Amino acid sequence: MDDRDVRALAVEVLSGIAPDGDFDSLDPAVSLRRQLDLDSLDFMAYVELLSERTGAPIREEEYPLVDTLDGCVTLLSPASSG
């Protein structure tokens, strides 16, 4: 899974949680919770689905990373994490 795949997966997961979101104009460095008006339950569903779909556990201390598209790539893309 490369950087582009991680971004696409994050958007796919988010589109199921916030179907009315404007995904074309997301700023990859800004909080997804803020941009898509996700409440805590929505955010937890997003984290759980990301973890499930990637097979990578996401620890609570990593939640701030997955709150941005750039952070998702940093955490979940093998190419980015080395």
Image (cartoon, rainbow, N blue to C red):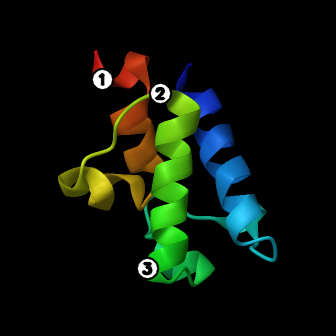
Query: Residue 6, located in which quarter of the rendered image?
Result: top right
Q: Amino acid under label 2?
A: Gly
The spot of residue 32 in percent (x, y) is 51, 68
Task: Identify whether 35 is placed above or below 53.
Answer: below
For label 1, count other residues whose C-alpha is less than 10 Å away and answer few (under 14), some (14-19) or many (20+): few
| Quadrant (top left, top right, bottom left, bottom right) of the N terminus | top right
- Residue underneath mark 3: 40
Mark 1 element type: helix
Task: Identify whether 10 is placed above or below 30.
Answer: above
- Residue under the image location 55 percent in, 73 percent down: 42
Task: Identify whether 65 is placed above or below 82.
Answer: below
Would residue 79 appear left or right of 61 to someone viewing this image?
A: right
- Residue under the image location 41 percent in, 16 percent down: 79
Let me know if residue 28 appears in the view: no
The spot of residue 27 in percent (x, y) is 56, 64
For label 2, count other residues whose C-alpha is less than 10 Å away and answer few (under 14), some (14-19) or many (20+): few
Mark 2 element type: loop
The spot of residue 81 in percent (x, y) is 30, 23
- Residue underneath mark 2: 55
Mark toward the start of the polypeptide (2 vs 3) = 3
| Quadrant (top left, top right, bottom left, bottom right) of the C terminus | top left
Mark toward the start of the polypeptide (3 vs 1) = 3
Marks 3/1: CA distance? 27 Å
Q: Amino acid under label 1?
A: Ser
The spot of residue 36 in percent (x, y) is 61, 77
Task: Identify whether 67 is placed above or below 36.
Answer: above
- Residue underneath mark 1: 81
In this view of the protein, which residue sits in the foreground, 81 or 28? 81
- Residue under the image location 55 percent in, 79 percent down: 38
In this view of the protein, which residue sits in the foreground, 17 or 75? 17
Asked if the residue under mark 1 is in contact with the one under mark 3, i.e. CB atoms within 8 Å, the reply is no
